[in-house]
């Protein structure tokens, strides 16, 4: 059976799905699709530390689905935007997991991951998949991966 590592940039998926569809991402539907006929070696959702009961409940749902949830402090920028600043952590985990799996699946549209995806693919001979909102996913990331999976109605609530 194909071994897979799943890495989810929670903030990116939340904001791009909301911007493009004004809907929420369905992590249960995503899990069912991503793990079908595959063995999950690792599945990590990278998020911000909860500042409300609603966020804490959402993160518990992620755990119940099957994700390990890694948390970082919420960083408020002067322009009003927020960031969890997980790019380096996701990249490091991706390189580590690439040695132990057949496929790396990254859920993010962030173009900063194009080099990491390319490097994982080339150095570890691992298949890569990226899931993101097509209109909001960096073209460099879509070019770097073996398979791009667009977020559509299958993955929306």
Image (spheres, rainbow, N blue to C red):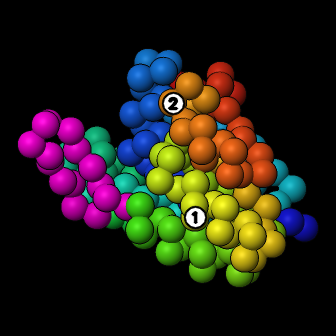
Real-space Cα separation, disc 2 to disc 1, in angstroms: 19 Å
Give the labeled residue for mark 2. 136
Classified by dominant secondary structure, the portion drawn in magenta counts as: loop
Please tell me which residue lies in front, 93 or 144: 144
Task: Evaluate whether residue 8 shows in this view.
Answer: yes
On residue 104, the disc is: none
Q: Earlier in the sequence, mark 2 or mark 1?
A: 1
**Helix, strand, or loop for circle 1?**
helix
Residue 29: where, in percent of width, then height? 66, 38
Residue located beneath label 1 in the image: 116
Q: Position of residue 28 (x, y in %)?
A: 61, 42
Residue at (51%, 30%) from the top-left corner? Answer: 136
Q: Position of residue 149 (x, y in %)?
A: 71, 38
Magenta stretch in the rendered image: 72-86
Image quadrant containing the C terminus: top right
In this image, 12 relative to 64: left or right?
Answer: left
Regarding mark 2 in the picture, which secondary structure is present there? helix
Instruction: Determine if residue 69 is in view.
Output: no
């Amino acid at each position: 059976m194909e071994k897979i590592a799943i890495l989810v940039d929670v903030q990116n998926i939340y904001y791009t799905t909301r911007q493009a569809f004004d809907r929420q991402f369905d992590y249960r539907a995503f899990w069912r699709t991503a793990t079908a006929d595959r063995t999950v070696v690792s599945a990590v959702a990278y998020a911000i530390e909860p500042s409300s009961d609603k966020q804490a409940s959402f993160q518990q749902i992620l755990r119940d689905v099957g994700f390990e949830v890694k948390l970082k402090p919420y960083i408020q920028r002067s322009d009003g935007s927020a960031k969890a600043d997980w790019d380096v952590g996701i990249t490091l985990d991706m390189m580590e997991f690439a040695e132990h799996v057949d496929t790396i699946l990254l859920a993010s549209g962030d173009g900063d991951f194009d080099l990491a995806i390319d490097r994982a693919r080339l150095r570890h001979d691992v298949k890569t998949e990226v899931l993101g909102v097509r209109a909001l996913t960096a073209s460099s990331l879509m070019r770097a991966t073996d398979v791009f999976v667009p977020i559509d109605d299958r993955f929306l609530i």
